[in-house]
């Protein structure tokens, strides 16, 4: 296989048939050894988390597939910590789409003068540019259009898909007595059909989930979901 990109929590390879393989690593985002799903730097290593995140991603991608939602997921090999996916064309240099059900994290750091920590939000969607040097800046619909990153139609499509996916995962987690607070998604276009599809991973590093008001740590979240399926 050919190495395409080294990422913070995954490396990307291309196999002989043109598909991509994501190698899940044990690195996690955060700072000073503290895990933070909203961070854009590697802050710690959690031995075994790569394989467990792959298991959670497999479960959630297959949940979405069974509900007719387009994703890049093909299959995975848990033993080798790899996921096989369709190649995708990203928007610009990549965008991240955050769906928030509760005001917490960076939302409170920005808007805490207007909202209390823990306030309920209506599946509120934010988009940031993937740009580590500029700390993943927020961008508006108008900004995305002005910069030629996506059209108004694509923006509307992206927001709708984000809310549909996030609500489905939230409902699934509610079955296990846990609550999805926020989730970070990525999208790209299928290179053959041009359809917008969910890409990247669906793991503990993408979301905040709580149980009885306490935010679950990565292994706690994964164990809570996968032990019941």
Image (tube, rainbow, N blue to C red):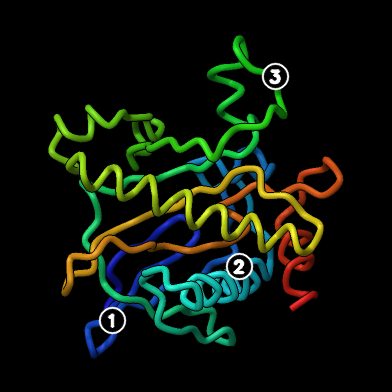
Which residue is found at the position 17% from the left and 34% from the top? 145
Q: Horizontally, is 63 left or right of 74 in the view?
A: right
Q: Horizontally, is 160 left or right of 26 in the view?
A: left
Query: Which residue extends farthest right?
Result: 212
Q: Secondary structure at mark 3?
A: loop
Tag nearer the camera, 3 or 2: 3
Query: Which residue extends farthest top?
Result: 113
Which of the image's four quarters has the N terminus? bottom left
Which of the image's four quarters has the C terminus? bottom right
- Label 3 crowd bin: few (<14), some (14–19), many (20+), radius 10 Å: few
Residue 198 image-quadrant placement: bottom left
Q: CA distance from mark 1 to mark 3?
A: 45 Å
Q: Secondary structure at mark 1?
A: loop
- Label 2 crowd bin: few (<14), some (14–19), many (20+), radius 10 Å: many
- 182 shown above or below 56: above
**Callout 3 touching callout 2 (CB < 8 Å):** no
Coordinates of residue 129 in the picture (x, y in percent) = 33, 38
Coordinates of residue 176 in the picture (x, y in percent) = 79, 63
- 74 shown above or below 5: below
- Give the number of the disc on residue 54: none
Q: CA distance from mark 3 to mark 2?
A: 31 Å
Q: Which residue is mark 2?
A: 53
- Label 1 crowd bin: few (<14), some (14–19), many (20+), radius 10 Å: some
Q: Secondary structure at mark 2?
A: helix
Q: CA distance from mark 1 to mark 2?
A: 21 Å
**Callout 1 touching callout 2 (CB < 8 Å):** no
- Give the number of the disc on residue 19: 1
């Amino acid at each position: 296989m050919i190495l395409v990109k080294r990422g913070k929590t995954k490396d990307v390879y291309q196999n002989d048939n043109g598909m991509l393989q994501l190698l899940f690593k044990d690195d996690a985002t955060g700072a000073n050894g503290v895990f933070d799903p909203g961070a854009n730097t590697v802050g710690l290593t959690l031995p075994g988390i790569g394989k467990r995140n792959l298991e959670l991603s497999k479960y959630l991608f297959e949940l979405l597939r069974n509900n007719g939602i387009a994703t890049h997921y093909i299959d995975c090999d848990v033993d080798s910590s790899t996921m096989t996916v369709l190649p995708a064309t990203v928007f610009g240099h990549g965008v991240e789409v955050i769906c928030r059900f509760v005001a917490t994290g960076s939302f409170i750091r920005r808007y805490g003068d207007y909202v209390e920590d823990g306030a309920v939000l209506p599946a509120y969607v934010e988009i940031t540019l993937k740009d580590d040097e500029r700390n993943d800046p927020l961008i508006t619909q108008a900004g995305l259009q002005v910069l030629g990153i996506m059209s108004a139609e694509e923006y509307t499509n992206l927001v709708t898909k984000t809310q549909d996916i996030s609500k489905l995962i939230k409902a699934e987690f509610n079955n296990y007595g846990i609550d999805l607070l926020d989730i970070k998604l990525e999208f790209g276009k299928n290179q053959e059909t041009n359809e917008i599809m969910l890409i990247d991973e669906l793991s503990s590093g993408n979301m905040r989930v709580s149980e009885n008001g306490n935010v679950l740590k990565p292994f706690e979240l994964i164990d809570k979901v996968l032990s019941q399926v």
